[in-house]
Image (cartoon, rainbow, N blue to C red):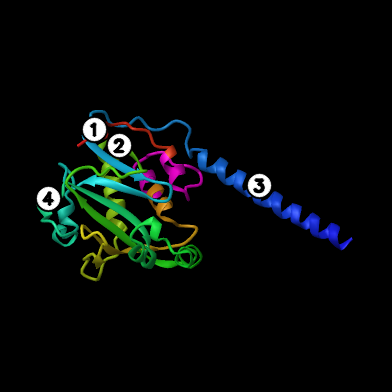
Amino acid sequence: MKGIRLRTAGLYGLYSIVGMIVLLTITALTPRQWGSKTQSKGCQFAVYVSGDMMHTDFVVPVRTAVFDWSQHLDLAHIGKHPSTVYRYLQFGWGDRIFYRETAAWNQLNLSSAVRSLVLQNPAAVFVKGHATVPRYPNSALKCLSLDQASYLQLMQFLVASFETDRQGKTQWLSRGQDGDSSFYAATGRYSILKTCNSWTAAGLRTAAINTPLWNGLAPAVMHQLNNTCSCSD
């Protein structure tokens, strides 16, 4: 009888795991809205989302006719190159300690990853300057055309992701491992319930871009995005 009870408990556990995987898969593939807002034509305000199997980032112009990042960040502190070289900025959000310790996914430390997911750790914003739109190996790149109102909403979301001091200044933490990027103190705390990908999805929603019901995984976020602009400079 004891053996039967153990096998039954094991089957229930297996069914629960399979059921959870199926549920997460369905919610990851299901959009929050069926049918999306008609986006601006002509790519006047184009933003990019880059994503691999683990992480998503925004890539936006340094300056447009309606928004200038030099008014919010000291571009000279981002990387080793002069600020005039940077035409695009890449933004990511994540666990402050994990982010700064892990230069690449092949350097992933299991204990650090578990700590990031289980504990609600302080967050950091990753900022990297680029002369052209970056294209990374094994990463997808989506270009989104926004109207002015949606574009400004997204820019304000990014600005609000930086933690500021009493004088309203962003708090620079350290230079990135590649020398062309920096980490800044961020608002919010990282956990399994709020990851880099759910942060990206939250930003997309401010710009009226569709996101999945469950946005914990990078491929789920990228799956809902359609190129509405040419991915070029």
Specify start and end residues of the magenta stretch as a single range: 202-222
CA–CA distance between discs 2 and 4?
Answer: 22 Å
Residue receiving disc 4: 85
C-alpha distance separating marks 3 and 2: 35 Å
The number of discs equals 4
Q: Is residue 99 above or below residue 155?
A: below
Whichever of labels 3 and 2 marks the residue nearer the N terminus, that label is 3
Q: Is residue 172 visible?
A: no
| Number of residues whose C-alpha sits closer than 10 Å to that of mark 1, classed few (under 14), some (14–19) or many (20 or more) | some
Give the label on residue 72, or none: none
Which structural element holds mark 3? helix
Quadrant of res 101: bottom left
Q: x%, y% of residue 173?
A: 26, 68
Quadrant for residue 94, please give it.
bottom left
Q: What residue type is labelled 3?
A: Gly
Give the mark, 4 or 1, whose residue is nearer the N terminus. Answer: 1
Q: Mark 1 points at which residue?
A: 43
Task: Tell me the residue at 47%/36% (across/down).
Answer: 33
Q: Distance between the residues labelled 3 and 4?
A: 50 Å
Q: Nearer the viewer, mark 4 or mark 1?
A: 4
User: Which residue does the numbered mark 3 point to in the structure image?
Assistant: 19
